[in-house]
Image: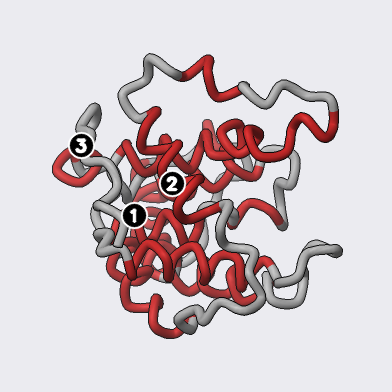
Amino acid sequence: MTTVNFTQMKDGTEEEYLLLRELEKPHLAMTADRILRELALAAEETLAGYRITRLEHALQTATRARRDGADIDWITAALLHDIGDGLAPQNHDRFAAEILRPFLREECTWVVEHHGAFQMVYYAHHYGWDPNEREKYKDNPYYASCVDFCERWDQASFDDGYGSDPLASFEPMVREVFARKAYDPAIVQDGIVRGLPPSS
């Protein structure tokens, strides 16, 4: 059998679902390829008005993290924190976090998920919005990590004069992260706060 017979999921047999699980393995193994392809698209499908492309913003953020001595989880989070911009511009932060959640520690995915609210401190007043939106998370153990992520890496990475590392230099990290076992407790580390490394 190479194709299932069912037309409704409730009618599938164990044999069919075992077949589908086996056939899904190559697709799962190509997750990093799809992530890298989406990042590359951010060089062309970008937001107007900025001095740099969405790809360059991702590279700058990740490069700053790397140059600060951050670990692979932080660097990957920095590289991919805005990957939702193309498909989910109204909730890009949550979209990106869901892509990362199975493969990074909880601290990093929480920061990605909430960085949009934390960034409002820099610009919300210009729109008449509440710049202190992040304060509703002040009791969260990851609050300080998100403040630091935004201040040191994210908000500072719109500089057309900054020398970012190329996307190819991050590719091995992306492949390593997305080759991890999904939701491995040793990786996800719920509730563990490491914080960002000291700034260089």
Per the rendering, the mark at residue 189 is 3
Distance of label 3 from label 2 (alpha carbons): 19 Å
Report the residue at 85% width, 63% height from top.
49
Pointer 3 and pointer 2: residues touching (CB < 8 Å)? no
Dot 3 crowding, Cα within 10 Å, few <14, some 14–19, many 20+: some
Picture quadrant where residue 120 is located: top right
Q: Secondary structure at mark 2?
A: helix
Picture quadrant where residue 7 is located: top right
Q: Secondary structure at mark 1?
A: helix
Which amino acid lies under the numbered mark 3 shown in the image of this protein? Gln
Report the residue at 47% width, 56% height from top.
153
Nearer the observer, disc 2 or disc 1?
2
Residue 183: where, in percent of width, then height?
A: 28, 42
Per the rendering, the mark at residue 74 is 1
Colour scheme employed for the rendering of this structure: secondary structure
Report the residue at 62% width, 79% height from top.
161
Q: Which residue is mark 2?
A: 149
Q: Earlier in the sequence, mark 2 or mark 1?
A: 1
Which amino acid lies under the numbered mark 1 shown in the image of this protein? Trp
Dot 1 crowding, Cα within 10 Å, few <14, some 14–19, many 20+: many
Indicate left or right for 20 with 133 as reference: left
Nearer the observer, disc 3 or disc 2?
2
Query: In the figure, 71 relative to 59: above or below?
Result: above
Between residue 161 and residue 180, name the one nearer to us.
Answer: 161
Pointer 2 and pointer 1: residues touching (CB < 8 Å)? yes
Asked if residue 37 can be seen in this view, the reply is yes
